[in-house]
Structures are given as structure tokens and as C-alpha cells.
Amino acid sequence: MPHLRDIAFARSGDKGDSANVAVFARSPAAYAWLRQHLTADVVARHFRALGVGEVTRYELPNLEALNFVLPHVLGGGGSRSLRIDAQGKTLGMALLEMAIEPAAVPPRLE
């Protein structure tokens, strides 16, 4: 089964108790797919086990990227949380592990 990492790469980071995850398409076709399928609700469901509630999505068409802001995802922040390795830097890799339906993968990856 294909994963999000097959059509995109990501960078993520944290500030206090919030994190952001930027997902960059590997091609224009992949960006069109991301805009249609990788919604804020899909990202919120993917991270539900971490207690993520509301997710905000920002489109960055000049970079063929989407940026997701996840408030209150870090259990109080790096200096307050007892979570191991729960810093925002790992969330991008975690999102890229999302499986996607083979039929939904963009037909052309460049």
C-alpha cells in the first residue's frame, strides 16, 4: 500500500504546546492530490491518539505545499510533557507514514 511519503515530504517543528507540519508535494499532480485529499480533518484523525482536536490547514501554492497547525498536541510542551520523543519534529515523519488508497495515488510522480 502506498504511503503519503511516496508523493510528498515534510518538515515539522514545535513552539510551546503547538506544532506545525508542512507537507511538500513531489510533483504538481501530487500537489493537486494533496489539496483534494489531505484535509485538516484527515490530519486530525491521523493524530487523534495524541489528543489532537482542531487542525488548521494553510495552502502554500507557490511552494506546492500545505501547512498544518496542531494546537495542544505536545502535552503541555517540551518542558512540561512526560511524553517520550513527542516533539514536533517527529510529527512530519509520522504523517508521512499515513497509508493512502492505491487507486487514489496521483498517476504521475516526477
Image: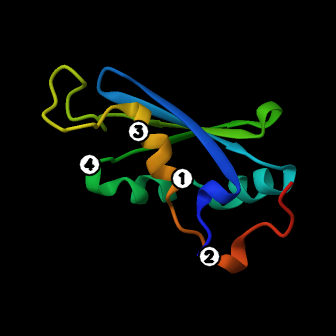
Alpha-carbon distance for marks 1 and 4?
19 Å
Alpha-carbon distance for marks 2 and 4?
25 Å
The residue identified by callout 3 is 90
Q: How many marks?
A: 4
Residue at image coords 36%, 29%: 18
Mark 1 or 2: in front is: 1
Q: Amino acid at mark 2?
A: Glu
Alpha-carbon distance for marks 3 and 2?
23 Å
Secondary structure beneath label 2: loop
Horizontal side of residue 69 vs 101, given as left or right? left
The residue identified by callout 1 is 96
Determine crowd level at label 4: few under 14, some 14-19, many 20+ residues with C-alpha closer than 10 A: some
The residue identified by callout 2 is 101
The residue identified by callout 4 is 51
Residue 35 is marked as none
Q: Amino acid at mark 1?
A: Leu
Do tag 1 and tag 3 residues touch (Cβ < 8 Å)? no
Residue at image coords 71%, 52%: 35
Of marks 2 and 4, which one's residue comes earlier in the chain?
4
How far from the left and from the top, in percent, is residue 23?
62, 42
